[in-house]
């Protein structure tokens, strides 16, 4: 029994190590990693990681509840374009000045060739640009492929 548990733990550690060392390169040679994490104060959240090669990793806990999927090269290009179209790198780092504190917080990040931009967004903060909200929805819908 101990051997089976030890083998299962090794398998999970190996799978997590493989995923975290995945080459994030797009077909055009860009190194891209996109993440979005939803933090829900009174329940479970989740994290979506999208790599430039189209691989998607989703889960509430990246070791024990990891699910995988993949999107096409065209979908990756479309998503990267959407970040540019939204002027993501020019957005404020924080849209979390909401008056109410029990709303989910969404943390969206993109790294392209080593340059990272992260935006924190309390969904009740009305200052957040509409393009940020559309981008979050798009990433969330991509993450649904993992289910």
Image (cartoon, helix red, strand yellow):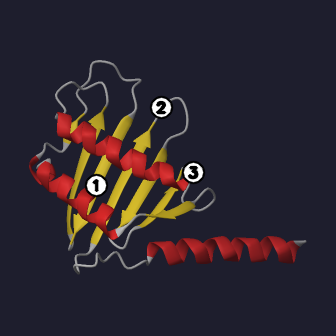
The answer to whether 110 is drawn above or below residue 40 in the figure is: below
Residue 21 locus on image (x, y percent): 44, 78
Camera-near label (2 vs 3) is: 3
Which residue, given by chain and number where applicable, does mark 3 sit on? 147
Which numbered disc flags the more N-terminal residue, 2 or 3?
Answer: 2
Mark 1, Cα crowd under 10 Å, few <14 / some 14-19 / many 20+, is some
Which numbered disc flags the more N-terminal residue, 3 or 1?
Answer: 1
**In-front residue for pair 93/53:** 53
Instruction: Kindly identify which numbered label has been placed on residue 109.
Output: 1
* Residue extending furthest toward the right: 1
Q: CA distance from mark 1 to mark 2?
A: 20 Å
Mark 3, Cα crowd under 10 Å, few <14 / some 14-19 / many 20+, is few
Which numbered disc flags the more N-terminal residue, 1 or 2?
Answer: 2
- Marks 2/3 in contact by CB < 8 Å: the verdict is no
Instruction: Kindly identify which numbered label has been placed on residue 41.
Output: 2
Q: Is residue 29 left or right of residue 39?
A: left
Q: How many marks?
A: 3
Instruction: Kindly identify which numbered label has been placed on residue 96.
Output: none
Q: Secondary structure at mark 3?
A: loop
Q: Secondary structure at mark 1?
A: strand
Report the residue at 26% width, 37% height from top: 133
Residue 67 locus on image (x, y percent): 57, 59
The image quadrant of residue 93 is top left
The answer to whether 47 is drawn above or below residue 53 in the figure is: above
Report the residue at 28% width, 79% height from top: 27
């Amino acid at each position: 029994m101990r051997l089976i548990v030890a083998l299962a733990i090794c398998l999970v550690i190996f799978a997590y190590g493989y995923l975290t060392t995945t080459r994030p390169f797009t077909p055009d040679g860009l190194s891209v990693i996109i993440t979005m994490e939803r933090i829900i104060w009174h329940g479970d959240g989740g994290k979506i990681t999208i790599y430039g090669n189209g691989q998607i990793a989703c889960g509430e806990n990246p070791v024990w509840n990891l699910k995988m999927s993949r999107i096409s090269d065209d979908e990756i290009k479309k998503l990267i374009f959407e970040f540019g179209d939204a002027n993501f790198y020019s957005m404020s780092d924080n849209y979390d000045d909401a008056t109410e504190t029990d709303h989910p917080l969404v943390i969206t990040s993109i790294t392209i060739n080593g340059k990272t931009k992260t935006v924190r967004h309390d969904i009740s903060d009305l200052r957040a640009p509409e393009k940020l909200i559309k981008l979050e929805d798009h990433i969330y819908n991509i993450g649904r492929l993992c289910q």
